[in-house]
Amino acid sequence: MTETSVFDLDAVVASGWADPQVFPASEWAAAEAFWNARRVHDARLLATREKASALVREWSGREPCDVGSFGLRCNLETSDLDLAIGCPLDRRAEVAERLADHARFKGERFTSSRSTRLVFVFEVDEVEVDLSVQTEQDFAIAGRMLDDIARHMSERERIAHTWVKHRLRAAERLEDYAAWKLVTYARFCPEFDWVPIPEPASL
């Protein structure tokens, strides 16, 4: 931890990674308290995630995984989940049709220069759940990415990353915030095209 009293948010954003060592002691204390406050909601979100995953299994016949910030323990909100499933291309239309009976289709987005994913949204226990239908290959890559993050991203790095995300959103730096949300994924999974989706003007 640095002994300086000024936290240079711009320098951290420019570096592309939140190193806990550059946090002044007072800033780190605030970051740690903020992150711990998010953890109070873990049990509730875990229960909701299990309900949502069970529904996805029922609707699609596929096994989902958590690919969102809650799964990484880098979430700001207490009411947002992101799941993904893998699906063979020749079954995508069939699975999409089944999902459309239960979830709203948000659109098709690029995952890499050669593949796309279908995104649906539904609600469980008043929690919004985004569901991405990926190719089987992309789903396998995402799984390896999540394993790498679990093994190599320390709790201190999760705290630092979450705090920077919080600071950017609080400052209404929405483009920087949208990009920062993706830096962990891009660091551990450069195969995908991590294109920021700007937040609405109102927070």
Image (cartoon, rainbow, N blue to C red):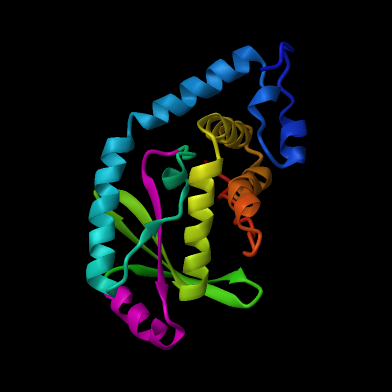
Residue 130 in percent (x, y) is at 40, 59
Question: Residue at coordinates 42% horizontally, 46% vertically from top-left?
Answer: 71
Quadrant holding the N terminus: top right
- The correct choice, above or below, for 171 with respect to 84 in the image is above
- Please tell me in which quadrant of the rendered image residue 15 appears: top right
Residue 42 in percent (x, y) is at 33, 36
Q: Is residue 61 left or right of residue 146?
A: left
Question: Residue at coordinates 77% horizontally, 32% vertically from top-left?
Answer: 11
- Count all numbered tags in the image, as a single digit: 0
Question: Residue at coordinates 55% horizontally, 74% vertically from top-left?
Answer: 116
Q: Is residue 25 left or right of residue 137?
A: right
Q: 44 or 66: which is nearer to us?
A: 66
Q: Is residue 196 left or right of residue 47?
A: right
Q: Is residue 90 magenta?
A: yes
Residue 174 in percent (x, y) is at 63, 44
Question: Residue at coordinates 33% horizontally, 29% vertically from top-left?
Answer: 40
Q: 191 or 51: which is nearer to us?
A: 191
Q: Which residues are magenta?
A: 77-101
Q: Residue furthest bottom?
A: 90
- Please tell me in which quadrant of the rendered image residue 192 appears: bottom right
Q: Is residue 27 magenta?
A: no
- The correct choice, above or below, for 170 with respect to 61 in the image is above
- The correct choice, above or below, for 195 with respect to 113 in the image is above
Q: Is residue 151 left or right of residue 127?
A: right
- The correct choice, above or below, for 10 with respect to 31 in the image is below
Residue 7 in percent (x, y) is at 71, 21
